């Protein structure tokens, strides 16, 4: 039935359709597109299966532990354990800890260069720098990074007190290393300036890198330390800890008393 206003010459087919196109070729093109989509999905499924298999193998060997990657001892996952609002802060602190670990390595190399340049204090510097690398790297992770990590994960005040104490101690240590007093194991400012005036270019260059590393991690930690301690609300909104009150100190004490050191590395 035709309506009065209907255009009798209007086509019922889309103007985008090519009337000369071979239907077989069009169908083949569509099939090829679908096959490519299916192939991509299969590859994606295979990738996910491989990831799951790797995770299962990792859990079989080490449990849920994933850190450090080369010899997993503890479980560490900012994305899984830290509230989303606090993840950027903990990520920055973890990055600063990585800068510290790298700086300790560079500092030791700089002390090797200082010893090779003929410095009378080179032996003391190298010995001390090796000691710093062996002890400061794990202790800094355990004594100031892990407490602030636990504080935001568990919302218990004891961990914030630990961070406040040991984080402050580490800031003093950072200033000490930035200065770079000879025979102390620090390739800081004084040692680097002496290397430039000697001159000993390898010592000066590596010492400069070490000094910059000490400054970066020290200033970064000082910024976040001051940010946490600027007010009496030193903690996340759900677990604030004030110096004048117990807050959630008792649950943390009970947890440590019950589970010992294990509570330090688990969600609890």
Image (spheres, rainbow, N blue to C red):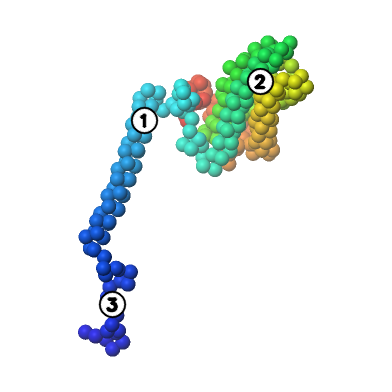
Q: Which residue corresponds to the image point at 29% horizontal and 80% vertical from the top-left?
A: 10
Picture quarter containing residue 177?
Answer: top right
Q: Do the residues labelled 3 and 2 touch (CB within 8 Å)?
A: no
Secondary structure at numbered mark 2: helix
| Residue 162, horizontal then vertical, whole percent | 61, 26
Q: Can residue 104 be seen in this view?
A: no
Using the image as rendered, state which of residue 14 and residue 159 is in the foreground: 14
Q: Name the residue under label 3.
A: 11
Work out how far the residue at label 1 is from the one at label 3, CA to CA, in angstroms: 59 Å
Q: Can residue 204 be seen in this view?
A: yes
Q: Which mark is residue 148?
A: none
Which of the labelled discs sits on residue 110, or is there none? 2
Is 85 positioned to the left or the right of 230 in the image?
Answer: left
Residue 54: mark: 1
Q: Which residue is drawn at 63% across and 19% down?
A: 108
Is residue 125 or residue 116 the one in the foreground? Answer: 116
Spot occupied by residue 91 in the image (x, y as percentages of width and height):
55, 36
Give the label, 1 or 3, closer to the camera.
3
Name the outermost residue toward the bottom. 4
The alpha-carbon separation of the residues under discs 1 and 2 comes to 39 Å
SS at badge 1: helix
Element at label 3? loop
- Nearest the camera: 213 or 143? 213
Label 3 vs label 2: CA separation? 82 Å
- Which of the 4 quarters of the picture holds residue 21? bottom left
Q: Indicate left or right for 106 with 154 as reference.
A: right
**Is residue 206 positioned above or below 34 on the image?**
above
Task: Assign the N terminus to one quadrant of the image.
Answer: bottom left
């Amino acid at each position: 039935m035709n309506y009065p206003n209907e255009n009798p010459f209007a086509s019922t087919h889309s103007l985008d359709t090519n009337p000369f196109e071979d239907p077989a070729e069009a169908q083949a093109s569509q099939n090829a597109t679908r096959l490519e989509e299916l192939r991509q999905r299969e590859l994606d499924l295979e990738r996910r299966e491989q990831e799951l298999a790797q995770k299962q193998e990792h859990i079989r060997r080490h449990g849920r532990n994933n850190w450090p990657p080369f010899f997993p001892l503890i479980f560490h996952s900012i994305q899984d354990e830290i509230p989303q609002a606090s993840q950027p802060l903990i990520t920055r602190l973890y990055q600063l800890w990585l800068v510290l670990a790298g700086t300790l390595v560079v500092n030791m190399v700089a002390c090797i260069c200082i010893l090779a340049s003929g410095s009378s204090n080179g032996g003391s510097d190298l010995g001390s720098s090796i000691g710093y690398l062996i002890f400061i790297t794990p202790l800094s992770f355990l004594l100031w990074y892990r407490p602030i990590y636990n504080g935001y994960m568990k919302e218990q005040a004891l961990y914030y007190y630990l961070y406040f104490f040991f984080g402050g101690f580490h800031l003093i240590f950072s200033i000490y290393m930035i200065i770079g007093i000879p025979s102390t194991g620090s390739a800081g400012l004084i040692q680097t300036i002496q290397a430039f005036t000697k001159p000993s270019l390898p010592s000066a260059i590596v010492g400069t890198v070490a000094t910059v590393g000490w400054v970066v991690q020290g200033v970064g930690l000082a910024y976040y330390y001051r940010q946490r301690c600027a007010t009496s609300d030193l903690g996340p909104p759900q677990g604030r800890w004030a110096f004048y009150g117990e807050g959630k100190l008792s649950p943390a004490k009970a947890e440590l008393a019950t589970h010992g050191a294990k509570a330090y590395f688990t969600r609890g």
